[in-house]
Image (spheres, helix red, strand yellow):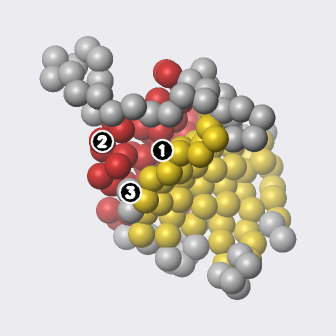
Amino acid sequence: MHQVHQEFGERSLGVGVDVDGRQSVDWICQPRLAADAREAAFRFLAGLHPAPPAHVSQNLVLLVSELVTNALRHAGGVTVLRLRADRCSVEVAVVDPSPAHPQDRTPDLAGRNGGFGWPMVQRLARTVAVRNEVGGGKAVCATLTR
């Protein structure tokens, strides 16, 4: 069972025990800006004990920033940003209203049209999954080893 408290005016933090007995921490919010999502990631990381290694924290913030930016830019917004950690892993899930999955494309070296983010997400994360949400939209999930 998760305990949830209010922060930023939204449901944001829950601590619970997974089915297999591992403790987990969930952070749930609905950022309107990538900067808000990064702030949520920093606060989430600050609450983890023991803290993940620095490179895991840095990679999580990069993943959060990229996935939220993509949802804001290409999918009409973020429905939910969910951060979850247990002793073995840290996961970010970004849910948005668009059914369109991320596409591989050739990066624009001139810097006008992007194309670098999705390959970066795939390189940084141990696993990446895109799943359709009941009622529409999708969730993009990336997991890092803690």
Mark 2 and mark 3 lie on one chain; the one further toward the N terminus is 2
Tag 1: amino acid = Val
Outermost residue toward the top in this view: 112
How busy is the neighbourhood of tag 3: few (under 14 within 10 Å), some, or many (20 plus)? many
Callout 1–callout 2 Cβ contact below 8 Å: no
How busy is the neighbourhood of tag 1: few (under 14 within 10 Å), some, or many (20 plus)? many
Which tag is nearer the camera, tag 1 or tag 3? 3
Q: Which residue is mark 2?
A: 119
How busy is the neighbourhood of tag 2: few (under 14 within 10 Å), some, or many (20 plus)? some
Q: Which residue is mark 3?
A: 125
Callout 1–callout 3 Cβ contact below 8 Å: no
Question: Dot 1 lies on which element?
Answer: helix
Outermost residue toward the left in this view: 109
Question: Dot 3 lies on which element?
Answer: loop
Tell whether 25 sits left or right of 87. right
Q: Which residue is mark 1?
A: 64
Tell whether 53 sits left or right of 41. left
Which tag is nearer the camera, tag 1 or tag 2? 2
The answer to which image quadrant residue 112 occupies is: top left
Viewer can see residue 11: yes
- x, y percent for residue 21: 70, 85
Mark 1 and mark 2 lie on one chain; the one further toward the N terminus is 1
Tell whether 124 sits left or right of 110. right
